[in-house]
């Protein structure tokens, strides 16, 4: 397979280039998120995955602002994702709450906005709001997270902008075959959360054997597997030596 690095991208269904590897910041407080985002960008990361639910959009915003200010990167060099929180579903509410996300992130456009979870009865209206944000140029791409095939089909039937991404759990013990086949057939990029299984996959004995054989760490083996599976990969770590 072609050489992969932190600048490798995959093309979304609207032509936007999305990095194939980025930093996740779930379970990271605002202060740590700010420091991690700035440092990870200096290390070459070009994608950050946050969500209103994580309570750290403000920290991510401070980290991005610091990286832009010190000249590490320009805004257009970093791909930033956030997500609609479950309590914010519905057309008007999603539009209103988006402004808070942008204020906390200190950004004037977002690269990818996802519906974090499919709240039944509301997610179709929420999707219409995302379509408006997309058409208005506030977000470069829109997608979903944690949607199964059936809910994706419901959304896609009434959509006027098709989802570019579905972010679901993916790692060596969570394969999502049905979803990945459906996504491939409909030009939807699959992005994998918990690519290290939340850290638990690191102690998998098979992974350990492969790591030993190739003189790599367990994390390196798993992340390589995730990326080579064609899934956009967003591991979380707050430790510089792991970036
Ligand atoms: N859409 C969704 O519903 C959803 C759900 C879950 C997650 N996500 C996104 O996906 C991202 C990643 O998922 P995740 O945070 O659940 O789990 P993950 O990335 O699979 O694993 C993170 C855990 O592994 C540890 N770790 C990372 N690199 C390591 C290494 N080289 N050696 C040993 N331990 C290591 C981290 O600890 P340290 O930080 O201490 O290194 C952390 O405890 C999240 O941060 C979030 O952005 C999305």
Image (cartoon, rainbow, N blue to C red):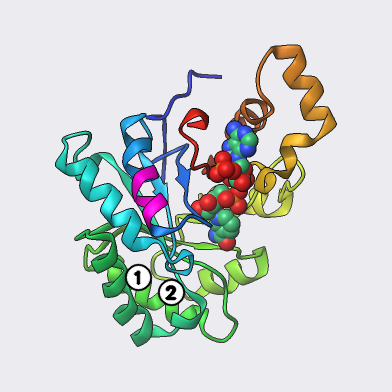
Q: Which span of residues is magenta-colored?
A: 31-36
Residue 62 percent location from the top left of the image: 27, 54
Residue 103 percent location from the top left of the image: 24, 68
Please tell me in which quadrant of the rendered image residue 1 appears: top right
Crowd rating for badge 1 (residues with CA inside 10 Å; few <14, some 14–19, many 20+) = many
Whether residue 67 appears in this view of the structure is: yes
Q: Helix or strand or loop: what does disc 2 sit on?
A: helix
Crowd rating for badge 2 (residues with CA inside 10 Å; few <14, some 14–19, many 20+) = many
Q: Is residue 35 magenta?
A: yes
Against 21, residue 174 (above or below) is below
Cα separation between marks 1 and 2: 6 Å
Q: Do the numbered discs 1 and 2 sit on residues whose CB atoms are within 8 Å?
A: yes
Identify the residue shown where x is 30% and y is 42%: 78
Identify the residue shown where x is 45% and y is 40%: 22
Residue that numbered label 1 is attached to: 131
Query: Is 192 in front, or is 36?
Result: 36
Residue extending furthest front? 31
Q: Is residue 121 left or right of residue 222?
A: left
Against 208, residue 175 (above or below) is below
């Amino acid at each position: 397979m072609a050489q992969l690095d932190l600048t490798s991208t995959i093309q979304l269904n609207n032509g936007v280039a999305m990095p194939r590897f980025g930093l996740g910041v779930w379970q990271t407080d605002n202060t740590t998120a700010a420091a991690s985002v700035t440092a990870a960008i200096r290390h070459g990361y070009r994608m950050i995955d946050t969500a209103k639910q994580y309570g750290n959009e403000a920290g991510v915003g401070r980290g991005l602002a610091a990286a832009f200010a010190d000249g590490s990167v320009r805004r257009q060099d970093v791909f930033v994702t956030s997500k609609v929180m479950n309590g914010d579903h519905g057309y008007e509410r999603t539009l209103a709450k988006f402004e808070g996300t942008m204020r906390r992130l200190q950004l004037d456009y977002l690269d990818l906005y996802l519906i974090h979870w499919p709240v039944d009865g509301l997610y179709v209206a929420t999707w219409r709001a995302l379509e408006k944000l997309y058409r208005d140029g506030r977000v470069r791409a829109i997608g979903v997270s944690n949607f199964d095939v059936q809910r994706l089909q419901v959304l896609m039937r009434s959509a006027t902008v098709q989802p570019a991404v579905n972010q679901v759990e993916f790692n060596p013990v969570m394969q999502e075959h049905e979803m990945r086949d459906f996504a491939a057939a409909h030009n939807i990029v699959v992005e994998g959360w918990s690519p290290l299984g939340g850290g638990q996959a690191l102690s998998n004995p098979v992974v350990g054997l492969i790591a030993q054989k190739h003189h790599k760490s367990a994390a390196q083996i798993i992340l390589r597997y995730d990326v080579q599976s064609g899934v956009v990969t967003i591991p979380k770590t707050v430790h510089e030596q792991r970036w």
